Image (cartoon, rainbow, N blue to C red):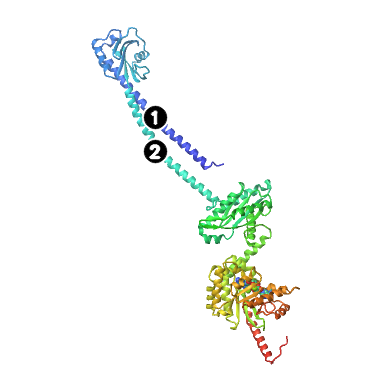
Amino acid sequence: MAASPGLSTRGNIAILSMLLCILVGGTWLVVKVTADHLLYRSTTSTARNWGRYLAESITDLEQIAAGERPSNASMVFFQAARRSGQVFRYEIFNRYGYSQLVSDQEKITVVDLSEFNADAARAIDSGQPIVDTQAGHSADLPAFYARAYVPVVIDQRPVAVVAAYIDQTTARNEVYKTFLLAAASLCLLTALSFGLPAIAWYRRTKEKQHADRRIRFLAHHDALTGLTNRPYLIEMLEKALAVLPVRGGSIAVHFIDIDRFKEINDTLGHDGGDFLLKTVAGRLRATIRLDDIVARLGGDEFVVIQSDANGKDAAEQFARRLMSALTVPMQFKENAILSTVSVGIALAPADGSNPERLLKSADLALYKAKADGRDCFRFFLPEMDTELQARIELEGIIRDAVRHDRFELYYQPLFEMSDRRLVGFEALIRLPRKDGTLIPPMVFIPVAKELRLIDKIGTWVLREACRTAMTWPEHMTVAVNLSAAQFLTGSISAIVAVALKETGLAAKRLELEITETLLLGNTETIIAELRTLKAMGVAIVMDDFGTGYSSLSYLWRFPFDKIKIDRSFMQGCDGPSHEAETVVKTIIALGRELHMRVTVEGVETAKQAAFLEQVDGDQVQGFFFGRPIPASELAASILADFQWQQAHELEAKGKIRLVT
Ligand code: C2E
Ligand code: MG
Ligand code: MG
């Protein structure tokens, strides 16, 4: 196994410190040995010189060595030599190495009982001076001194040995002081010349390590939240799945997506979005157990791996815990963020035996949770795969149709109830597939809304419907359905005005159909828009009336021009009970009271048509009277109506008799 970088750095530091110690210690040692050597050389040389000087200067040395008293001249010399300061003692030995005279301090002693000195004897034998240095250990000796035993040879005959003891304490101290200074300076220099690059190297290594750690962290984690990223999650999931067969149990993958994150991001700005993501990350971290993994896959998508899920129930409980932790309101500056999340759950090994498949299964389940209204969790089911394929295909067709204007408008006729006169058409959008079959609006409009393409589509419908209506007789109207989403993004009245202006259609010929869901939201702004449209001369129609939550309350909040009774009531009329019929009659009466025209939608059968004979409605629409048809077939339909009307007029005038 490779050593970790941390360990190798510590090892390197130890080696460097050791090298530094060796260098400093070595420098110290070399300087010390050199100083000692020099001191020895200088000290012993001084001693030897003194010895020689004494040997040459004392004329009666042979006599003294033979045990006679020194001459007066020698005594004077001894005194003088001792006073010179450095020589604190000298001795004269006979040629056998026995001491004969000792001059010590103030005293010159002629030794009676002479003592043998091995050094002196050696000097006589070798004929060479013997020198050494000594440390003085008693009070009468200097701390450091040198001794020289110099043999005195007369006529090639050794006659005596002169020993000089030289006090070298001051000299030694001086040398040591200089040595210390030199050693310290050298050590400092060595330390600096070695240490500075070493420190620089150490700092560089540390910085590199820090950068390496950061790079490694970023390679495995998400920079914003610090959570595990997708590649690392897959790596860990792979490991967890590898041990699953041995360990048993199951792993749950919880795919979490913040509901309407984009809206929050748009409202609070990126700071707010980042705050939300970080808070979610923090809460997820706080909710999971030690063995679990929490990752951010990007955007507002998080994944939690519940490592020991132990079946569906445990996964469900865990998902509930995650959801309730994440839906606690958060405070960002002065804004309270109330967000919900949707969760898709996949279980391993049942829903996938590799990370990619598991994540895909969880993502599909999340997709279902979103489609089911968000703020909920869903488990993966095998059939979700095909649903997703269909959805992806549909999204592709929608995008393509928007890009290349591939939508088509069909037109369903509206007739006056009293005389069955054609009064206009409702434009109904169709999305053709490649094979020519048509996708109904109920299928693709909700998807287009999610893709945020409904604005573009709606604008195209308006323009296209107005353009087509311009080809019809002037008394005919065109009805266009508006989706609530079209009111949210921009000014719909401005878009309508442009469509009218560009196509030249008179505003009174345009009817705009809205459903009551539009009025559930930001009503004030929407009602203001509707008023603007009405003021332009456009008729506003309440579509699918009777299917919503509180239709009646909307009726008095805005003066609709027309109410279209939802087709479900017509279907109800086919049943045995007369309740639906009563409701239809009541709505028509209500419309009368409120001065709103009433259209009955979804008339499919002759029985339904017959029932309408008895009621006081304004217009009818339904398969019984005419199915939605493409624009290309409209001319024939309009012509047929024209002929029908003319035939009726002739019949009225008694000129012909129509046979039905
Ligand atoms: P809607 O506005 O209520 O349109 C009437 C729907 O009822 C049409 O369905 C029409 O084909 C269908 N219909 C008409 N008569 C009968 C009948 O006798 N029996 C039955 N069973 N159905 C009948 P379509 O065209 O599938 O449209 C469905 C809905 O899609 C429309 O309901 C409308 O809400 C929406 N839609 C259609 N075109 C557009 C559009 O251009 N923009 C928007 N935003 N929505 C549209
Ligand atoms: Mg409609
Ligand atoms: Mg309708």
Q: Residue at x 40, y 36 (%)?
A: 191
Q: Percent from the top left, x then y, of residue 407?
A: 60, 72
Q: Amino acid at mark 1?
A: Val
425 in relation to 61, above or below:
below
Give me the residue at 63% from left, 73% from top. Answer: 543
What quarter of the picture does the N terminus occupy? top right
Is the residue 453 above or below the residue 106 in the image?
A: below
| Mark before the other along the chain sequence, 1 or 2 | 1
Q: Quadrant of the C terminus?
A: bottom right
Read off the residue under disc 2.
Answer: 193
**Can you identify the residue that label 1 sits on?**
30
Q: Amino acid at mark 2?
A: Ser
Q: CA distance from mark 1 to mark 2?
A: 18 Å
Query: Is 133 located above or below residue 497 in the figure?
Result: above
Residue 551: name its quadrant: bottom right
Judge the density around disc 2: few (<14), some (14-19), many (≥20) Cα neighbours within 10 Å: few
- Indicate left or right for 608 with 302 as reference: right
Tag 1 secondary structure: helix
Residue drawn 67% across and 62% down? 386
